[in-house]
Image (spheres, rainbow, N blue to C red):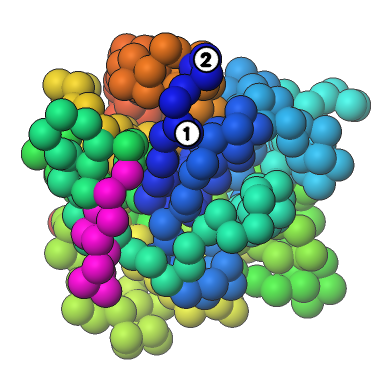
């Protein structure tokens, strides 16, 4: 954008990887940007486990943000190793070991990535405890944001980077996420190399995966010896919706469901130290498209929520960087947003279809647990 009469006021709703990447690249190009975040502070809740950032998308975004070198300093390239185990014998069926020095998909803890992005922003960029209730496009240009505290504010552009249950999405689309048929149950182990050595050795330096009969098990190594674990089940949406406070009952049911699995794998369910958490998976329709609305757009899960098969954060960050670059190089903000959407929407539809099919292949619908 060349010599604007004034810097447009841009708000990004959501301080996840995509929203923070967008804000960082916008600031690098001299834009006034505010990140609106419901959480009261950066440490208000856990940021989840580990993720791998790919050379073709997540790392492209970090390069645009001037943070690729810092990311490579913090990342764990050894975390790229992937082990597939037989569910009944715990025997290794396949092991993918990265070449020495390979950086195609290095792992990084989500909390570490978020901290890196936050540190890159100008002081005061993020308004903590400022949750968005809705976004209303204005006649002509701009968008009014209503906050959960009852206040409101107008911006030239509002970017919905507020995740699966986005409050901004309704400004451009009536689509709502639908249940995929799969639910994760997560837990974890602290200091696993010392306290759960056999499991740590089974997992290795990266990810361990096993599946059989409509069930899966994934264990991922995080930094500091933490193992992030998830049982994956094709079950009805209502499964255990009201019964998860009975942790021992849930544990007993999981052990029964995985009753014929090898005991080394069942150990994850039997001995997990973190509370068992129910995580039903939802996705937006494919393709999710909308008619362009001046003053508002979406990125990441708000735009293209899909099953978690390793591309969500990467696409969100690429969305954020590309949106910022499009706005920075276009004659007007609206032209930049249009250019961004013309690329993002078809790209995300392709990935969403692939993830939809990938989930069905990994946990076939015919193997659903009644």
Could you say which quadrant of the image residue 80 lies in?
Answer: top right
> Measured along the vertical axis of the image, is residue 208 above or below residue 124?
above
* Vertical order, 207 against 253 (above or below): above
Q: Position of residue 23 (x, y in %)?
A: 54, 41
Whether residue 186 appears in magenta in the rendering, the answer is no
Residue 279 picture quarter: bottom left
In the image, residue 177 lies at what x, y percent?
19, 45
> Relative to residue 175, is residue 60 depicted above or below?
above
Residue at the extreme front: 5
Residue 353 relative to residue 71: left or right: left
Asked which quadrant contains residue 118, the reply is bottom right
Number of numbered labels in the structure image? 2
Q: Which residue, given by chain and number where applicable, does mark 1 sit on?
A: 7
Query: Circle 2 sits on which residue?
Result: 2
Q: Secondary structure at mark 2?
A: loop
Can you say which quadrant of the picture contains the C terminus?
bottom left
Q: Is residue 113 visible?
A: no
Identify the magenta region. Answer: 145-155
Residue at 89% x, 26% y is 101
């Amino acid at each position: 954008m060349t010599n604007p009469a004034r810097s447009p006021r841009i708000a990004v709703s959501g301080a996840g990887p995509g929203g923070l990447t967008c804000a960082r690249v916008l600031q690098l190009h001299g834009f006034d940007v505010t990140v609106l975040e419901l959480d009261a502070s950066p440490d208000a809740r856990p940021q989840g486990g580990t993720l791998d950032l790919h050379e073709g998308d997540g790392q492209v975004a970090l390069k645009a943000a001037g943070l690729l070198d810092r990311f490579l300093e913090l990342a764990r390239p050894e975390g790229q190793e992937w082990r597939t185990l037989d569910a009944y014998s715990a025997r290794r069926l396949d092991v993918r070991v990265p070449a020495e020095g390979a950086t195609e998909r290095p792992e990084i803890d989500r909390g570490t990535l978020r901290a890196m992005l936050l540190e890159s922003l100008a002081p005061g960029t993020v308004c903590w405890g400022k949750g968005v209730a809705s976004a209303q496009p204005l006649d002509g240009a701009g968008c009014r944001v209503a906050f959960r505290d009852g206040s409101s504010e107008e911006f030239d552009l509002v970017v919905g980077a507020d995740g699966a249950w986005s409050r901004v999405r309704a400004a451009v689309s009536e689509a709502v996420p639908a249940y995929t048929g799969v639910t994760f149950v997560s837990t974890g182990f602290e200091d696993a190399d010392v306290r759960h050595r056999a499991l740590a050795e089974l997992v290795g330096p990266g990810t361990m995966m096993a599946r059989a009969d409509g069930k899966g098990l994934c264990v991922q190594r995080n930094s500091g010896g933490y193992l992030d674990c998830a049982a994956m089940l094709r079950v009805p949406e209502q499964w255990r919706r009201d019964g998860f406070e009975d942790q021992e009952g849930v544990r007993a049911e999981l052990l029964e469901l995985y009753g014929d699995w090898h005991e080394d794998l069942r150990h994850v369910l039997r001995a997990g130290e973190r509370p068992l958490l129910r995580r039903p998976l939802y996705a937006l329709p494919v393709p999710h498209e909308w008619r362009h609305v001046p003053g508002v757009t979406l990125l990441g899960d708000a735009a293209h929520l899909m099953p978690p098969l390793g591309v969500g954060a990467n696409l969100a960050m690429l969305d954020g960087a590309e949106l910022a670059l499009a706005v920075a190089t276009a004659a007007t903000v609206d032209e930049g947003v249009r250019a961004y959407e013309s690329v993002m929407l078809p790209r995300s539809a392709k990935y969403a279809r692939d993830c939809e099919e990938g989930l069905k292949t990994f946990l076939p619908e015919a193997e659903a647990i009644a």
